[in-house]
Image (cartoon, grey):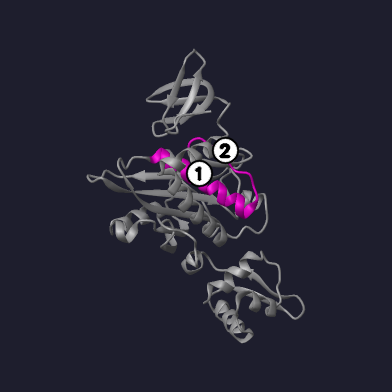
Amino acid sequence: MDPRVSLALRRRRSKPIAPDELARELGLAPKRLVQEIEELARAGFAIESHPILGLRLAAAPGLLADEIVWQLPVSRIGRHVRCVNQTSSTNDLAWQEAARGQDAADGLAVFAEHQTAGRGRRGNAWIAPAGSSILVSVVCWITGDPNQGALLTRATAVAAAEAIEEQASLKVGIRWPNDLVLDDRKVGGILVEARPSTGAMGPVVIGLGLNVSQDLAAFPPEIRRIVTSLAMLVEDVDRTLLARSLLVRLDRVLGLAFDPRGAEAVRQSAAERCRTLGRRITIQESGSTFRGEVIGLDPDYALVLRLSEGGIRSFPAMTAHVMA
């Protein structure tokens, strides 16, 4: 199968194109295009052919690694991609890949159609019907202290927001520390995991879930008022194109985050998107509860509050939890 053809049809978002025009666009002979269309059909693509309107992608199989990596302009994140139909958790699968070592696993992205035990921050479950979401984990080796979860969470949130905006033209906010929101409804979440390392470098796994094609009935009743999906707001968001955009953005933003010259731009972008700024919240840390107005994010992504009882205090993302 030639990913050029399938990606070209995906990018047209179900709009038909004449076969001759598509062949010219891709630099293929008409006969070769026919052969590629037949091969796509065998791979599970449903391509309609109209004698006047031309070719139209009616349906496609799940995420395919060959499509995601095809001529992907990345230097590190997304150079290698693995796609599976089902796993307990993409983070678990990514840790298995990380055991192969840095040379084999650094930058690897693992996508799944379905998770049987997906997890979020603070032990929460991540629920998504098969084929409805972007469920991905990325293996990344970092220097120094491997427990830089806050930095990676912030950078991943910025990258995911940019990818959604590129593919769905929606303005995405960040609800500190790890939620992506549209109109204050959660559309995605991030879970960064690190394990003790004795060396100067160590692996971390960045997990990300994005709600793409669910309707409201797909979510448990108790959370329907606080969640959303891209399909509930816009039409024709293609998961493969979103996955490609996400990896390109992650590659760029994570590169900036670990470069002193670019880190400030990532911090500024996260602050501009942060929907928690300016709000009065209740936050819990080490068994104690605090209330106040959020007045900023410090350079390490800690939430800065002007406390109701007076004074200003920072709350690190790794130890604090927003209650309301």
Residue 225, by quadrant, is: top right
Residue 157, disc: 1
Counting from the top left corner in percent of width and height, residue 111 is at 45, 59
Q: Is residue 57 above or below residue 95?
A: below
Residue type, numbered disc 1? Ala
Residue at coordinates 52% horizontally, 40% vertically from top-left? 179
Residue picked out by circle 2: 273
Mark 2 and mark 1: Cα distance apart in space:
9 Å
Q: Is residue 157 magenta?
A: yes
Residue type, numbered disc 2? Arg
Highlighted range, magenta: 149-177
Tag 1's secondary structure?
helix
Residue at coordinates 61% horizontally, 75% vertically from top-left? 26
The reply to whether dot 2 and dot 1 touch (C-beta < 8 Å) is yes
Q: Residue placed farthest to the top in the image?
A: 309
Instruction: Bin the neighbour count of mark 1 within 10 Å (Cα to Cα): few under 14, some 14-19, many 20 and up.
Output: many
Q: Is residue 62 left or right of residue 122?
A: right
Q: Residue placed farthest to the right in the image?
A: 52
Counting from the top left corner in percent of width and height, residue 265 is at 50, 40
Counting from the top left corner in percent of width and height, residue 184 is at 61, 37
